[in-house]
Image: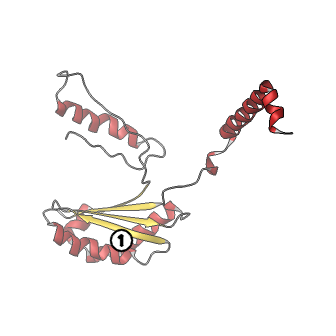
């Protein structure tokens, strides 16, 4: 068949094109979700609070021992950490693609438990939170009231009391990040 054959018969060309598109759409919806690749590597978030400490103190007394302990875990790709002047330490541990996120979170928690004796008593008392996380934002929701209908404090309190807890209870939700007015 030559190109002239399809030029002389435009209806046949259109039918073949529509058939290919229809089969592609049908195949797209039949493709199971497991076939989509995992783009973001699995990661585990560690958060610790050292009340009243400056960022430098948090870095030396909280982040350094935790990072040293985490450093030997299998399949760790890299570690990032930040310390704020309000005493909050945030450490994110990224793992190689294909690592089981649940097992990675357990390994990180075990290592942190092993070095909890090296951490300041205030940090251990406040607790070190370890949770697996997905580094992609899946949904953004907005809560607002018409101009002057409710004060900002009421909307913020409503969000904290009713919306955030319900969203956190949904299956598959690891963390809810609320941003905007406090």
Tell me the residue at 70%/34% (across/down).
Answer: 21
Q: How many marks?
A: 1
Q: Quadrant of the N terminus?
A: top right
The quarter holding residue 123 reads bottom left
Q: For this rendering, which residue is in front, 54 or 7?
A: 7
**Which secondary structure lies at badge 1?**
helix
Q: Single out the residue that lies furthest toward the front.
A: 4
Tell me the residue at 17%/71% (across/down).
Answer: 56
Q: For this rendering, which residue is in front, 168 or 27?
A: 27
Percent x, y of residue 47: 30, 61
Percent x, y of residue 103: 50, 65
For this view, does 21 lie left or right of residue 182?
right
Q: Single out the residue that lies furthest toward the right.
A: 1
Is residue 79 depicted above or below 179 in this figure? below
Tell me the residue at 19%/22% (across/down).
Answer: 147
The quarter holding residue 135 reads bottom left
Percent x, y of residue 30: 69, 39
Q: Quadrant of the C terminus?
A: top left
- 10 Å neighbourhood of mark 1: few (<14), some, or many (≥20)? many
For this view, does 72 lie left or right of residue 1?
left
**Which residue is disc 1 drawn over?**
112
Q: How is the image coloured?
A: secondary structure
For this view, does 149 lie left or right of residue 76?
left
Percent x, y of residue 22: 71, 32
Q: For this rendering, which residue is in front, 122 or 45?
A: 45
Q: For this rendering, which residue is in front, 15 or 36?
A: 15
């Amino acid at each position: 068949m030559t190109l002239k054959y399809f030029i002389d018969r435009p209806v046949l060309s259109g039918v073949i094109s529509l058939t290919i598109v229809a089969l592609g759409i049908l195949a797209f919806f039949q493709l199971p979700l497991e076939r989509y690749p995992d783009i973001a590597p699995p990661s585990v978030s560690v958060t610790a609070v050292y009340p009243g400490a400056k960022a430098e103190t948090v870095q030396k007394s909280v982040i350094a021992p935790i990072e040293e302990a985490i450093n030997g875990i299998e399949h760790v790709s890299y570690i990032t950490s930040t310390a704020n002047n309000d005493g909050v330490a945030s450490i994110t541990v990224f793992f190689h693609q294909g690592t089981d996120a649940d097992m990675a979170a357990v390994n990180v928690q075990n290592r942190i438990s092993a070095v909890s004796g090296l951490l300041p008593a205030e940090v251990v008392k406040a607790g070190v939170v370890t949770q697996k996380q997905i580094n992609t934002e899946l949904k953004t929701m907005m809560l607002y009231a018409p101009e002057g209908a409710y004060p900002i404090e009421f909307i913020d309190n409503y969000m904290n009391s009713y919306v955030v807890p319900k969203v956190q209870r949904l299956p598959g939700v690891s963390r809810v990040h609320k941003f905007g007015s406090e």
